[in-house]
Amino acid sequence: MVGLLQVNAEPWKSIYEQGQLPTWIKSCPPEIEIVNIYGNTPNTVFRFLDIIHERLRWSPLLQGPIHALDRYLNQFLRKKSNPKWSEKDEEYVTSLHVKVPSMHLTMPIVEIILFKYFLNRSHADFLYFSNTSSYINLIELDKLIKTFPVSKVYGGTSDNFGDIQFMSGANRILSRDLVEKLVSNYSLWDFSYVEDVSMGKLLSGDDTNFVAIPSQVFETKEQIDSADINQIRKNVQFRLKSGNLKLRNDIELMLYLHRTLVSKGQSGN
């Protein structure tokens, strides 16, 4: 199963509808289910506060006070493990609307619904999840998964925050047993860290199989043109990001990358 964590606001909604849907989602093999999950659109004030809060989390000078605040907020977030949500079957995806504000701080609440949906409604061995700025090569992802162990798989684009190893939020995969671990240990998530860091903290252990999911970042068409087409074909996740929130070019880049793969004979598209 593939899960897309979407921020229910612009420009992300347009990137999903005009970039992801007509390209790799439409080309998805029938045996792979895609779930698009999102929260309520926050008002302008909450969005501004969420952006400022996320920036301060990474500030060396303010990390201490922000983490202290977030540890207090933990008490509220951990009580929201069963928010209301609705399901809608669409042409290429199943959409899940979680009734919480769509913010960085509430992302674990949205994720827990995705995890429960995966465990209760799917028999798949792995859950891969990404975000709206990503183009996913599902053919290569499927090939790669067949080389993985059947359990304790935590994979993606590896990074470190202090002594915590974690997988970047835009490119992650979990085996079914680790999804179960996250759900059953939701009360142990440390939300004083950024969501993907807190997940890495909880999943770290000597028996965890850390695996790499190939990823590339493209910000311009020229970068796509100059890249090795054989490397592009074998890549799984493409992060397409350009400009600021008001002047993003993700849609055009996603369509261009898709046309490049099709014209160069990428199988399955």
Image (cartoon, grey):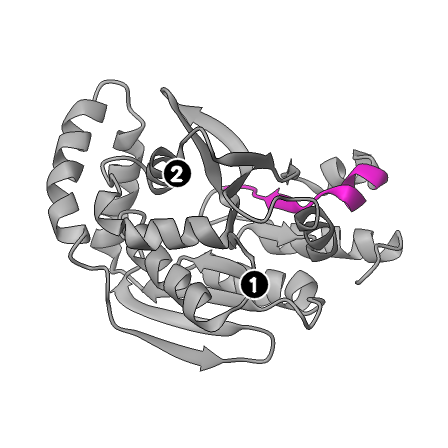
Q: To which residue does mark 1 refer? A: 124
Q: Residue 251 at what x, y percent from top left?
A: 61, 56
Q: Nearer the viewer, residue 138 or 200?
A: 200
| Amino acid carrying mark 2 in the image | Leu
Q: Please say whether residue 241 is one of the residues in the magenta stretch.
A: yes
Q: Nearer the viewer, residue 259 or 92?
A: 92
Q: Earlier in the sequence, mark 2 or mark 1?
A: 1
Please provide percent x and percent y for residue 154.
50, 41
Q: Residues within 10 Å of mark 2 (few under 14, many from 20)?
A: many
Q: Residue at x 66, y 49 (%)?
A: 145
* Residue in the image at 51% along x and 50% along y: 175
Label 2 sits on a secondary structure element that is: helix
The number of numbered badges drawn on the structure is 2
Q: Residues within 10 Å of mark 1 (few under 14, many from 20)?
A: some
Along the line of sight, which residue is nearer the eye, 242 or 28?
A: 28
Residue under numbered circle 2: 203
Residue 29 located left or right of residue 134:
right
Residue 75 on the magenta span: no
Identity of the residue drawn at 58% across and 50% down: 134
In x, y percent, where is residue 70? 17, 38
Quarter of the image for residue 42 reads: bottom left
Which quarter shows the C terminus? bottom right
Residues in magenta, as a range: 230-243
